[in-house]
Image (cartoon, helix red, strand yellow):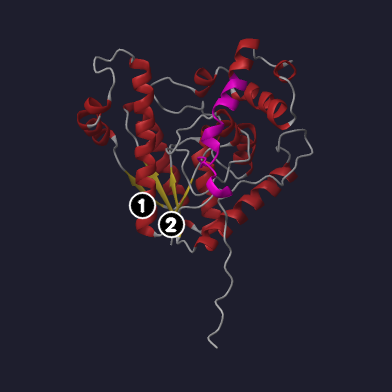
């Protein structure tokens, strides 16, 4: 069985409450669609189940809960993959969630991997060994950690004949707020069409604990770090701006009108959407001979004559 598959997202659910799917009927439709797609994707791949990297946050919790609903708890593996002290509380929360869902949960400390990488690879690859650009170096190491997590998730998936479920939502994907080939690598994104606003509403609809739904979103890079600090605005403003800019095709000025987003921040967010397109697409080939990627569908083998 191969786990190298295209991701799936869900774009056929509609809301009667404006651009966001937050009304009961819309949420129920999205809920049913996601559960059905997880089930069919795993079946189509001939997989035994799924692996989810769990942080204790809302996205990974909702993804895991929906996977359990689709497949049963015995077919879902949760992974806690901390590297820094600031992530300990999140992993503890993830373990509690996993126990409540009745799934297998394994924890791997990534700090030794990072230390080994810094001892062996960094001295050879670092252009400025004296740390002349520490902010850029720290960002690069943050990407390394995200890729370590996906290495672990795919090792578990390969060894257990499972697929890897990504946990990114539409807000994060549009902003490129993920690591390419790190948390941006997965076989499927159950929440990939839902804005953070909608993920929160869906979490409430399926009974995710309030303490998780109301938790300040953070990537856990360091103590006190938040998504709002990194992105320049909270999701309450980012999501309406993104729906206007991307889904409705409004100008930057019109999209920011009436929101708590200043002109500079609005332009920065729009720039992020455009600049991170490469994270959301398959790497290009030169197109030699007009050859393109294709998906083949094979029917039953012909009977021997």
Residue 179 point in image, percent of width and height: 45, 33
Helix, strand or loop status at disc 2? strand
Q: Is residue 82 visible?
A: yes
Q: Which residue is mark 1?
A: 156
Residue 53 point in image, percent of width and height: 42, 43
Residue situated in front as seen by the camera: 249 or 11? 249
Asked if labels 2 and 1 touch by Cβ distance under 8 angstroms, the answer is yes
35 sits left or right of 101 in the view: right
Q: Quadrant of the C terminus?
A: bottom right
Residue 194 point in image, percent of width and height: 63, 38
Tell me which segment is drawn in magenta.
Answer: 269-290
Query: Mark on residue 189?
Result: none
- Distance from label 1 to label 2 (Cα)? 8 Å
Residue situated in front as seen by the camera: 13 or 300? 300
Lower sequence index among marks 1 and 2: 1
Q: Residue at x 59, y 41 (%)?
A: 192
Residue 273 position (above or below residue 94): above
208 sits left or right of 164 in the view: right
Task: Report if residue 270 lies within the magenta region.
Answer: yes
Q: Which image quarter: residue 54? A: top left
Q: Residues within 10 Å of mark 2 (few under 14, many from 20)?
A: many
Q: Which residue is mark 2?
A: 162
Residue situated in front as seen by the camera: 146 or 125? 125
């Amino acid at each position: 069985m191969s786990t190298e598959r295209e991701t799936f997202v869900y774009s056929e659910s509609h809301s009667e409450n404006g651009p966001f799917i937050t009304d009961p009927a819309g949420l129920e439709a999205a809920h049913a669609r996601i559960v059905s797609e997880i089930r069919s994707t795993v079946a189509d791949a001939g997989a035994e189940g799924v692996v989810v990297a769990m942080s204790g946050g809302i996205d990974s919790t909702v993804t895991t809960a929906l996977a359990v609903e689709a497949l049963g708890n015995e077919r879902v593996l949760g992974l806690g993959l901390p590297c820094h002290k600031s992530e300990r509380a999140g992993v503890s929360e993830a373990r509690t969630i996993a126990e409540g869902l009745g799934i297998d949960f394994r924890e791997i400390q990534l700090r030794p991997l990072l230390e080994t990488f810094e001892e062996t690879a960094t001295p050879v690859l670092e252009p400025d060994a004296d740390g002349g650009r520490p902010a850029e170096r720290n960002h690069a190491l943050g990407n390394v950690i995200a890729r370590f997590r996906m290495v672990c998730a795919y090792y578990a998936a390969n060894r257990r004949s499972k697929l890897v479920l990504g946990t990114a939502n539409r807000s994060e994907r549009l902003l490129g707020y993920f690591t390419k080939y790190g948390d941006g690598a997965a076989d499927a994104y159950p929440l990939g069409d839902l804005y953070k606003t909608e993920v929160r509403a869906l979490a409430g609809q399926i009974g995710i604990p309030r303490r998780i739904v109301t938790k300040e979103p953070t990537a856990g890079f360091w103590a006190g770090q938040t998504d709002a600090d990194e992105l320049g605005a909270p999701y309450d403003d980012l999501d309406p701006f993104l729906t206007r800019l991307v889904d409705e095709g409004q100008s930057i000025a019109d999209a920011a009108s009436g929101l708590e987003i200043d002109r500079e921040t609005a332009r920065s967010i729009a720039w992020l959407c455009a600049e991170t397109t490469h994270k959301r697409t398959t790497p290009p080939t030169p197109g030699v001979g007009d050859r393109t990627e294709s998906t083949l569908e094979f029917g039953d083998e012909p009977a021997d004559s």
